[in-house]
Amino acid sequence: MKKFLSGNEAFAEGIRLARPQVISAYPITPQTIVVERLSEMVEDGSLTAEYVHVESEHSALSCAIGASAAGARAFTATSSQGLLYMAECLYYAAGGRFPIVMMNADRSTALPWNIYGDQRDSLSQLDSGWIQAYAENAQEALDLALMSYRIAEDKRVSTPYMANLDGFVLTHTYETVDIPTREQADSFLQPYETDNRIDFDNPRNMAFSAGPDTNYIFKYKEHEGVLAAREVISETEAAFTEIFGRQYTGLTENYLTEDADYIIVTLGSIAGLCRETADKLRGQGIKAGVVRIRYMRPFPNVEIADVLRNVKAYAVLEKDVSFGNEGTVFTNVNSALKKAGIDVRGYNFIGGLGGRNISAADIENIYTSITDGTDAVNFIGIGGEDNGK
Amino acid sequence: MANKVADSISREEFFYGHKACAGCGGSLAVRAALKVLGQNAVSVLPAGCMSEVGFNFPQLCFSNNSIISTFAGTASMLTGVEAGLRARGYKDFTAVGFAGDGGTADIGIQALSGAIDRNDNIIYICYDNEAYMNTGIQKSGLTPFGAKTTTTPAGSNIHGNIRPKKNMFEIVAAHDIPYAATASVGYIADFIAKVQKASQIQGTKYIHVIAPCPTGWGVVPDETVDIAREVVDCGLWYLAEYENGEFTLNHKPKEFTDVAAYLKKQGRFKHLSDEDIRIITESRDKKWDYINKNFGI
């Protein structure tokens, strides 16, 4: 069934179809619509779940961890300050191998206060042990919601999953979305089964301490779990295509990259404008391409190396900066190339912080700048170590 | 009486082989409560003494389902466990939290307030040893006036902690909780009866049990129970319940024992001046005026 939905609403529809058993909800702009819609679904009976009105984001995730430890499928959603407030619980959920799914509406972090979209909130939590996906549009948001549990709950993975939607640009923008049927969804996603739970026949001591001898073995296994998601994502997307028809391309999505000389690597909703710009430049004879990173964790090391191997230069465009260094996505991309022994000119373009618009002209300018060569780290439209000259 | 109480609880041990200090009042409270609640209790314990001494992989000391929560997250994890088990169709279980004074009155008070507000079907037991004992005896919101801790040193300028204990029992009652009670491991039959009563009530239950820490209080380990009785007998603690909107006093000492004697046998109070003891005694009397006026018997 096709409906006109915002990103938040589409994600809520995906979660409804995924049948979470416990939803812990605390409102924060621009995530609120998700928890509002889910409360309506519980009210009207289209979703059977325990809906818990927690008093903070810390409790939202702590509650979800408790529910997951009870063997229930758990969902929560947050954004920005809320994500940072629950940060302790992010590491806790990952270390406990609880496959909770959380939607994060990517939003700027204070100070200064700002409710608009950038990706500094979620990217600051890359090390928390969660799978991190970044949606581009409302349909992908719904589809990620449905795929997320199948990936997170796979026994090889057993890792929580964070689906990121750009604040406002994606969470509040309406698009036509195809909503699968209940029957389709149920055939795709089975109920959650796990041994990592409270068991009255065989009582468990969970979330324990582990000293220096064993602690790092648990951490190593946690690392393996996130890495295993790579294969499971690919299998899950293949199964998804079989039932729903739509195709996804794993950790990255490439556009006109086959013969590209100049590639922009980016993530989230800005990718569409990058593709349009690449089309325009192709018309002028410039071999432009786009790589959209769909998953920051596990990181697409192989995909990035393969696609950038033969370019003349690449740019990483991101709504993020690690102050005193560069954008974190740039750091990750460069590491992938270094590990693969690839030496290509690369540039970082930081923009969109606090929701500032990135225009088609800005993107065209990125392609031009990397053709000519520019500073390593550039703040779009500002100057300094940037391309604003 | 004692035999009747002993017969009313399980002979099985659910918290056994842990590394708690000799004479630990907190472990006594956990042990007794689990004997009441039995095999189908699911315990949630935050980072703190009881999780520290009981959950060291591979030495795991709970024979019922148990899980450590984040320090601030005892109540919120209890909520999740209860909701998750209920969502999976379980009915015959008790979600019970055991958190210390810091985990309850300081860092965990927000989550606790949220759980009571939702009236989640959980029992929350605060074992109050009156300081952050696990980290080495630092002041908490439930450290009493005058107590020396490692962050409230007693010197000539400041005589230990300058503030009285937060009144968690009445803070919790102010949420109009279905059931709240105070207790002491020195009156273990009373504590056990309150856990039994709590297990029969629907909604959120809160029990605040005084659980001396010989290490932090500066008493010998075999005096835990005696000192936990004496704090009640001298009137600095009281045994009460809150139910159906009413406060009830369960135990009224005919005559208070000497406050100074209670204080002076503990290392943490050794430094107190006569003036300090006068302040403590006055505040006790003021509290009892309030209790006598507002609590039923």
Image (tube, coloured by chain):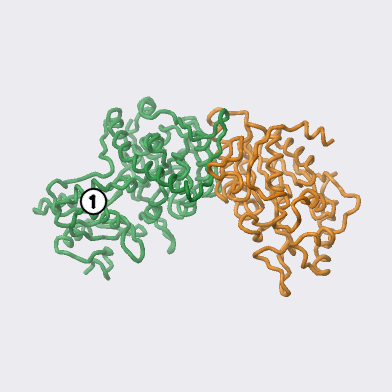
Any part of residue A41 in sight: no
Q: Find the residue positioned furthest to the right.
A: B254
Farthest bottom residue in view: B157
Whether residue A324 can be seen here: yes
**x 25%, y 53%: residue:** A339
Q: Position of residue A154 (x, y in %)?
A: 39, 34
- Residue B270 position, x and y percent, is 78, 65
**A328 or B29, which lies in front?**
B29
Of all chains in the rendering, the one displayed in orange is B
Residue at left offset 73%, top offset 62%: B147
Q: Image quarter for residue B236?
A: bottom right
Q: In the displayed structure, would residue A238 be above or below residue A317?
A: above
Viewer-closest of A123 and B58: B58
Q: Nearer the viewer, residue A126 or B218?
A: B218
Helix, strand or loop under label 1: helix
| Apparent side of residue B293 relative to residue A65 in the rendered image (left or right) | right
Extreme residue toward the front, this view:
A213
* Image label count: 1
The residue that appears at 39% across and 54% down in the rendered structure is: A107
Query: Can you say which quadrant of the picture contains the N terminus of chain A?
Result: top left
Which quarter of the rendered picture does the C terminus of chain A lie within? bottom left
Percent x, y for residue A192?
44, 31
Residue A6 sits above or below residue A115 on the image: above
Q: B201 left or right of A254? A: right
**Residue type, label 1:** Leu
Q: Residues within 10 Å of mark 1 (few under 14, many from 20)?
A: some
Question: Which residue is identified by label 1?
Answer: A273
The answer to whether residue A195 is above or below residue B236 is: above
Q: Which chain hosts label 1?
A: A
Q: Which chain is green?
A: A
